[in-house]
Image: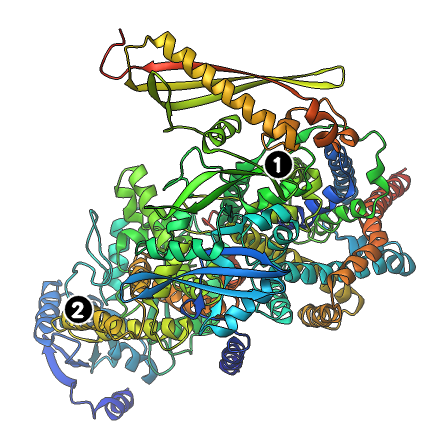
Amino acid sequence: MRALKLLIAAMLVMVLSGCWDNIDINHRVLPVVMGVSKHDGNYLIYLQIPEQVQNSTQIKIVKGTGSTINHAVDLISANLEDRVDLLHIKVIVLDKKYAEEGLEDTISDFMRGRDVSPKTLVTICDEDMDAFFSSVRKKMGPKGTTLYDFFEKNAGWNPQIALTRVWEVYRSIHSYTRDVAIPIIRSGDTTVVQHVGSAVIKEGRMVSQISSEETLLFNAFQRESTQGKIEVMNHASVLVIGNSLAVHTRMDGGNPVLRSKLKLKVVIMETKDHPTSDMIMKELNESLTHQFNQMFAKLQESEADILGIGQYFRRQIPRSELKEWRTTFYPKLKLELQVQTIIENTGFLELK
Amino acid sequence: MDSLIQEIKDSLGNNDDFFLQQYTIGEARLLLMGFISLIDLTKSKEALYDNMHNWKLEANTVTSMMDAAGEVIDLDLEKAIMLLMDGKLILFFERECRFVVAEPVPSLLNRAIESPTNENVLQGAISSFIEDIDTNLGMVRKQVVSRHIKVKNLLAGSSHKKKLSVIYDDSKADIKLVTKMIKQLESSSDHEINNLQHVTRALGLSAWSSVPKFNTTELPAEAAAALGKGRVILFVDRMPFALILPNLIWDMFTLENDRNFPLPLMISIRVLRVIGVLTTLIAPGLYVALVAVNPEVLRIELALTIAQSREGVPYPAIVEMIFMLIILELIIEASTRLPKSIGPTITMVGGIILGQAVVTAKLVSNLLIIILAATTISNSTVVGFQNSLAIRLFKYVIVIMSAMYGVLGLLAGLVLICAYFSSLNTFGISYLNINMKKGEARNG
Amino acid sequence: MDKSLHVIFMYGLTQLGFIFFFYSGDIIASTSEGHWLAIIIGLVLNGAMVWLYMKGLGYFPQQDIISIYTGLGKGAAVLFLLPLIFFLFITNIITIRAFSEAITLIFLANTPLWAIMALIIIISGYIALNGVESIFRTGVLLAILFLPVILFTICISFQNVDFRYFFPIMDEKLTFLTKPPYWHSFSAFAGSFLFLGFIQPYVAYRPRIVMITVAALVPFYFISVYVPLFTFGQSTASTFKFPFIVLMSTIHINWLMFDRITMFLLLCLVTFTMLFISMVLWKLSQVLHRCLPKVKSSYFVIVIAAVNFIGCLFITNWDEIQSLIMWNTMLRFYVLVGIPCSIWLIGIRSRRMIKDEGA
């Protein structure tokens, strides 16, 4: 009797397991990078697919158009021999023009569906997508994940690259007090990609652009580690080995005021014309402060709070007014940044 | 009384190893009966002779002689045959018409006490149980010198008689459990007991339970430790191991021998075994789940490598997995069947040649081979072969569930196994009890 | 024999699933600021009710609530138990259905819904068939296996928090009290502690330990609501159906060999929920068994499971689940407040009657 029951159960399992289509991993196409651009209301999708050909990886770029992203992917999928699976997309490259139009729908769709992970990195491409992807394919080595490694923190990431993921962009669309910066890349002359700065995204729309150096300051302000960045000045170049930020906020009669102190620990790498350490510190402080103020002026003008300064004022401003942070308070914000440099050591040589 | 002799002769006489000899000591004339295959007759006679001659010849000499020879009893056919079968020598004093059951010198049918064959001991006592139940009892007695150790002998079987011994520590064991067990054994004394399935049935336990109801050990030290923990030991004659009742889940991970190592080492060894069991259960299922249903859980680098290694494999992951698992089971089964001298050949053929060829032939992915190796190796970390068999079976449940539901199926399979474990109990003691104090368990 | 450990694991595990799946979403949807107040009001109510319930049960040692109610007479028993039966039934259907929906959303897009529901029901049914002690033991085993995973994922969930989202602190108007999502949030409490009244004849436990468990669960309620808030901010978090699950999918760990940790948290919670469902099945079978003592209670488990499954099949979409949850609100509050209070009152009454008889 029991044996019969077991047999029936086993048969049932056998029948059921063939019931729905689970596709094995080798029958799925696993694109790593997806490019999205928009032409005449139609989405143009690029997929960068690593393909294993006899122990080496080759990159395949496929392209498709459709009225929605999923439609385009579906069309690509229909034309490929395996099913396209967006589950492993690591980097999304957005067309700059498209980013300027506004990303809200796309990003929301990514968050809605389960396919694209909210952890996926977002970048903006500064040139024509066709050109970008064909150049990437030519230059990319026998490794499927190059473009992804460029951003990976334990691989090719540099402190002047803003790291932004889909969920952060989504948050910036909805949040009252927070915007994001998205790295801008283009194909490099000798390298696969070249980092040209960061796009300032306000509520899902690209409104301005900051340079690589400014992005470094942005990262420092986000308390991201800026370790490893080399700062070049007139008299010396230094290696940043640590950074910290102290912030003090206050409301000055309806005007928000933020005082912050950025501490940088540096090591001297090269010197020119025998500077003293005081000179180097002063020069560094001045140049960074100047750079930061310039960037902040630009940001304030575009009303995009990528530094997340509004966050500091959540305590002072009630929620109902916080809604107008970007338009009412942010333009009036006074930001005083003080850069303090500490020269940790001067290498094996003494500074004179 | 001669009629009884005749009856015995009738029923046993057609056995060529049965003897019925006339023998005279002094004035007593006796008939000796027994099995030549069980009794060393020459030595027995010598002993008998010595025994009787040392006796002071007094009045009524034959009676004292009878007392000296053994136990004087009244016999019927049934009992006589049983005693003979048991290897006893029966003396029939013709003049007095009395039967005496003597303890003869048995012919040597037992092996010597050796080191265990199915269990390995590192740093510990290595003598193991043998087939003879009395020797085994003696070994336990020697191991635990305590007046609390109680032994209860039982006889089971209607046509094939089998000796059983129940041993327990009356200061530690749950007496209710012991009496329940003995009562159960007595009530099913007409069951034949030739193997462990029979024992299970005689104990009134479900024969369908995949987890063995008793833990077996060959080592007196383990058996003694079990007694100390309040377990009951059952010996079956002709079985060279002790059956420890009830079997609890923690027995899968612990050996008393572990305690011969320092405490941190003991803990790490046991943790290792737990990891082993989990790996055995999870690894094959996880592979199937990740490859077939939920590849998004894999990191991209891994996903690409796996996709590459599976390129050209013509069937789904579940088939691939089950196919290789079964081949592996066949290898294990084959190497147990074969004599020790040919065993290594199978290992080589199976492990090296087949493993390599099957990958080059693109019948399975090479990651799968790694998974299988990990599974098989970790399966062997379990204490007790019977436990490792159970675990080996359960992993199929998880593999099949994973093929259907991916990672969800994997965990659901684990839940199912947990639920199954928790539904098991032996004489009201749950399989999941951590330790058996008097009464019931503290936790688990 | 004391089995407090089993009981507290059971109590804790069955709540965790609800906390991280539904509670965080409900609370975030019900108010836009001062969530802690909403949480605390719920927790205090829950704590008080559990305390009352156990106080009431303390008057009836070795009795379950079915016999307590039937002790009042047939009419009273029907009056009290009928809503309970309905509540348990609907809760079971909602739980099964909602969790399977979440599972398809998050990682089994190709698997048909009925198959997932069937899996959940079959496994819960199997656990329930083995009897109450087996349910408890399974709970302990699952806790040992999966709680470390849950605790680990909870620890790493703090990866992207920004504590400044804690402000603004207060919602002066207490608007959340009138919002339906807030009522729904009580489903995390209701139903979880009911089993304490069913197990008395089978499993002994110390009431004090249960209260400690109630206290120990408090951080989880806060974590489930506040970590998504700290990460996304209120205005973003309120757009998610399952804020905590989305939160988990934003966690990025370099050194782990797996990519989507969400899945592990979620699946562990699903296993705990299976435990919850099996408990409900067992409770239902107990009540029905008392009504029709001739039928074996294991048959009831099978029948109830089948009916639940069919019930789940009739729900076509998420909105229907929502409306079902809505209808269940009345019953939920009856179970959450009515049953503990009534047990307590009956307890006091019986105590007085015994005293009177003694005097």
> Residue A258 versus residue C313: which sits nearer the camera?
A258
User: Can residue B411 be seen from the camera position used here?
Assistant: no
In the displayed structure image, the side of residue C29 where residue B121 appears, left or right? left
Residue wearing tag 1: A179
User: Between marks 2 and 1, how big is the CA–CA gap?
Assistant: 86 Å
Mark 1 belongs to chain: A
Q: What residue sits 26% from the left and 42% below the top?
A: B260
> Residue A237 versus residue A239: which sits nearer the camera?
A237
Q: What residue sits 63% from the left and 60% below the top?
A: A40
How many discs appear? 2
Disc 1 residue type?
Answer: Asp
Percent position of residue A287, x then y? 46, 18
Percent position of residue C126, x then y? 59, 66
Mark 2 belongs to chain: B
User: Can residue A87 be seen from the camera position used here?
Assistant: yes
Disc 2 residue type?
Answer: Asn
Percent position of residue C274, x then y? 61, 59
In the displayed structure image, the side of residue C297 where residue A146 appears, left or right? left
- The quadrant of the image that shows the C terminus of chain A is top left
For label 2, the crowd category at 10 Å Cα-Cα, with few meaning under 14, some 14 to 19 and many 20 or more, is few
Considering only vertical position in the picture, is B266 above or below A35? above
Q: Secondary structure at mark 2?
A: loop
Considering only vertical position in the picture, is B372 above or below A184? below
In the displayed structure image, the side of residue A252 where residue A120 appears, left or right? left
Q: What residue sits 75% from the left and 40% below the top?
A: C46
Residue wearing tag 2: B110
Among the 4 quarters of the image, the one containing residue B182:
bottom left
> Residue A71 versus residue B12: which sits nearer the camera?
A71
Instruction: Give me the disc on residue A261.
Output: none
